[in-house]
Amino acid sequence: MKPSEIARLRAALLDWYDANARDLPWRTEPGEATRTDPYRVWMSEVMLQQTTTVHAAPYFHTFTKRWPTVSDLAAADDADVMAAWAGLGYYARARNLLACARMVAEDYNGVFPDTEEALLKLKGVGAYTAAAVAAIAFGRPANVVDGNVERVMSRLFAVKNEVPAARPELKRLAGLFVSDHRPSDWPQALMDLGARICRPKSPLCEQCPLSFGCEAYAEGEPQSYPRKAKKAERPHRLGHAFVLRDGKGRVALVKRPEKGLLGGMLGLFGSEWSAVPAYEPPLTADWVEAGTINHVFTHFSLDLTAHVATGHADDPSLIWIDEAEALKSLPTVFKKALERALA
């Protein structure tokens, strides 16, 4: 594609973005002079990893209201942050969020660095997040490539290679559009196009400002891009969860180990998650099976059978919490099991 064609496509998309930009809580109005608080950009990008904007928005409001600056977040108690994150999933992100906030507060006097190179030195900040913060918050020309951008590029250039092998090529193609002109707006315009028009299924090509230069549209099968390698079948595991109630409206929770799946989060007593999990209640009681819930993680699916009993245990590792509060604080998989047990 010639530079003149790149420039024409770029201008068309920015014109579309000026008229159609999404109203998002972490975003400012389109325009060369506008800049977004890097704390808000960083927070939103961490939350949006593996999460939709609709699901992330209320969490963003909660976090920025409760901890309005990066220094406020850095000073927060780990348990409070992890509880506030419950339901967003991918809990390593919450631990990285705290680690990064504390690094910015302690090593950078509460001020985010303003270049990709410096941002990459922050704990938990990868290439995508560094590029997004540099571009959107600081107006640096950076190549910001997420799933939406990959999809747009694969269709614009009709890239035949399959994802994930095609990703380096898609990133190279996206880099052709990076410019000093409106570097904050450009990645957001691409993301909005991917989210609203160049959708994974049923793309709205007749409404697309780039259809005049889209090779996949010219071929007549834009929905066939990006080409994806067949996914391996997701393994399936089983497990037991034990809900101990005290008869006074409280339930016993435990804190999970810092490392591993759901590390550092509150959880229920339980077995290992495997093909044949052992049934080992944490104490002797009249345990009643309450039913089985299903939950899908990134790398495996899980059938978790809930068991409920009323009793008491003198165990200092137990955390007794009001049942209603527990439903707000637990990761989704344990919330499902607790709901089944309480029902």
Image (spheres, rainbow, N blue to C red):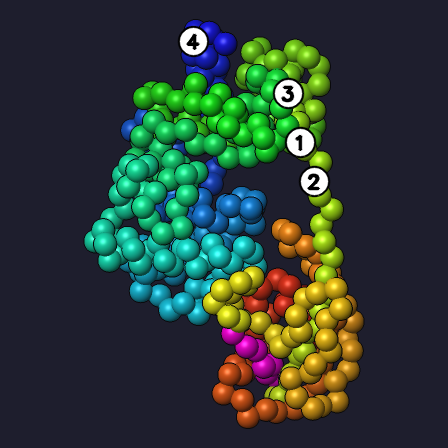
Residue matched to label 1: 228
Q: Would you place residue 95 above or below residue 243 in this image? A: above
Expressed as whole percent of the image width and height from the top left, the position of residue 233 reads: 74, 46
Residue matched to label 2: 231
* Mark 2 to mark 1 CA distance (whole Å): 8 Å
Expressed as whole percent of the image width and height from the top left, the position of residue 334 reads: 63, 68
Residue 325 relative to residue 293: left or right = left
> Considering the numbered disc 2 on the image, is that residue within a helix, a strand or a loop?
loop
* Mark 3 to mark 1 CA distance (whole Å): 10 Å
Q: What label does residue 160 carry, if any?
A: 3
Contact? badges 3 and 4 (CB < 8 Å): no
State the extent of the magenta-drawn residues as a range. 249-255
Residue matched to label 4: 3
Residue 195 is at least partly visible in this image: no
Contact? badges 2 and 1 (CB < 8 Å): yes
Mark 3 or mark 1, earlier in chain: 3
Residue type, numbered disc 3: Lys
Q: Main secondary structure of the magenta part?
A: strand
Contact? badges 2 and 3 (CB < 8 Å): no
Q: Nearer the viewer, mark 3 or mark 4?
A: 3
Residue type, numbered disc 1: Lys
Instruction: Assess whether residue 215 is covered by the magenta stretch.
Output: no
Contact? badges 3 and 1 (CB < 8 Å): no
> Considering the numbered disc 3 on the image, is that residue within a helix, a strand or a loop?
loop
Q: Would you place residue 262 above or below residue 93 in this image? A: below
> Considering the numbered disc 1 on the image, is that residue within a helix, a strand or a loop?
loop
Mark 2 or mark 3, earlier in chain: 3
Residue type, numbered disc 2: Lys
* Mark 3 to mark 4 CA distance (whole Å): 22 Å
* Mark 4 to mark 2 CA distance (whole Å): 36 Å
> Considering the numbered disc 4 on the image, is that residue within a helix, a strand or a loop?
helix
